[in-house]
Amino acid sequence: MNYAVGRIAFDRPEQYRRYVEGLIAYEKAKAAPNGREVLYWGPRNRADRATQLSADCLIRPLFDGIPATGDQTALPAIAEQRRFRSRCLRGPDATRANLLEPLHAVEVGRRPAFLFTASHGLEWPNGHENQLAQQGALLCQDWPGPGVPPRSEHCLRAANIGDDAQLHGLVAFLFACHGAGTPAFDQFLANHAKGPVPIAGRPFVAALPQRMLSHPNGPALAVFGHVERAWGYSIRPRGLGPRLRPFRNLISRVLKGEPVGHATKDLSDRFTAASAQLNLLNDPSYLGARPPASELAALWVECNDARNYVLLGDPAARLRVDLLA
């Protein structure tokens, strides 16, 4: 809650070497390997409330800004505030091919400096042969929607990032279930008496951010993501409209060139506030009004959800905004 913490966890020693050498090379570079651009990507699948929420209430207002309502003044798009160009691949445009293209672009100007995605992340059962390699893979607009089992061509997996990808200097935020990793045990049990329930043989960092942070052609600088399932409370808290300040401030700090570890402050503050409220309402000596059990349960889920954002990479990494053009 109080410190700018980053983590790395790779499967092979050479992946650590690639990340460290890539970070040092980026800090010493005389030219930026990517352009002064933010890329937003978010599927909006048929009859799927989750991606409709993330596309309409997260991706769109981050890209467009927030219009004035009542006594609230309008908020411009963050990229515009920081003098960055921006592109948005949303709904029908949020295909796997359209996301892979800028990540493999030959032209420096076509490579984004910051990537923000919001989608489902694949989840495999404990012990499944695909769990370590594909858990958290991004489900794309190619998926027809609920009722159709996702297939490999519907997803962006670590294996889809070719050796010719151009990720060096990229900072990414992957808003997806298991997008950053998976714990060993279910953290959202409806009945604690039936737990603990294992959901993986061991805790692990997702393969996609591992691939991005150890890419042989130059690694990404950092990846923000979510451990375990991601819930809509991050976008729309209980009984409220969309609350995007933590995401807006995170993007703004990264585009300003601050260390990426500082960018997580508002996410940590959201967890701190939810945790303090939950602790108070569970205190037997508390004499104030107590919410119904359903609201208390929702607060507990919101608290766990807010806790599970992590930064993968060195918290001191930063965009070289002085070089971006």
Image: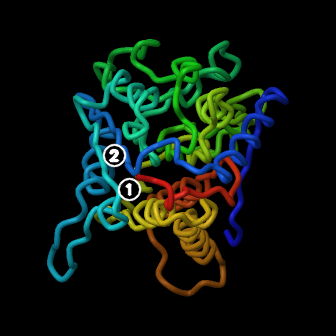
Residue at 62 percent across and 15 percent down: it is 130
**Between residues 267 and 125, which one lies in front from this camera angle?**
267
Q: Secondary structure at mark 2?
A: helix
User: Is 96 drawn above or below residue 231 in the view shown?
Assistant: above
From where the camera sits, is residue 195 visible?
Answer: no
Residue at 66 percent across and 33 percent down: it is 210
Residue at 60 percent across and 78 percent down: it is 280
Numbered tag placed on residue 54 in the rendering: 2
**Between residues 245 and 230, which one lies in front from this camera angle?**
245
Q: Secondary structure at mark 1?
A: loop
Residue position marked by numbered label 1 in the rendering: 235
Residue at 58 percent across and 45 percent down: it is 223
Task: Tell me residue 190's x, y (percent).
Answer: 57, 45
Say whether residue 62 is left or right of residue 204: left
Task: Tell me residue 52's x, y (percent).
Answer: 27, 41
Q: Residues within 10 Å of mark 2 (few under 14, many from 20)?
A: many
Say whether residue 98 is left or right of residue 91: right
Quadrant in the picture for residue 262: bottom right
- Furthest toward the bottom, the residue is 287
The answer to whether marks 2 and 1 mark residues whose Cβ atoms lie closer than 8 Å is yes
Q: Amino acid at mark 1?
A: Ile
- Furthest toward the right, the residue is 13
Task: Tell me residue 211's x, y (percent).
Answer: 63, 29
Q: Amino acid at mark 2?
A: Ser
User: Is 30 drawn above or below residue 245 in the view shown?
Assistant: above
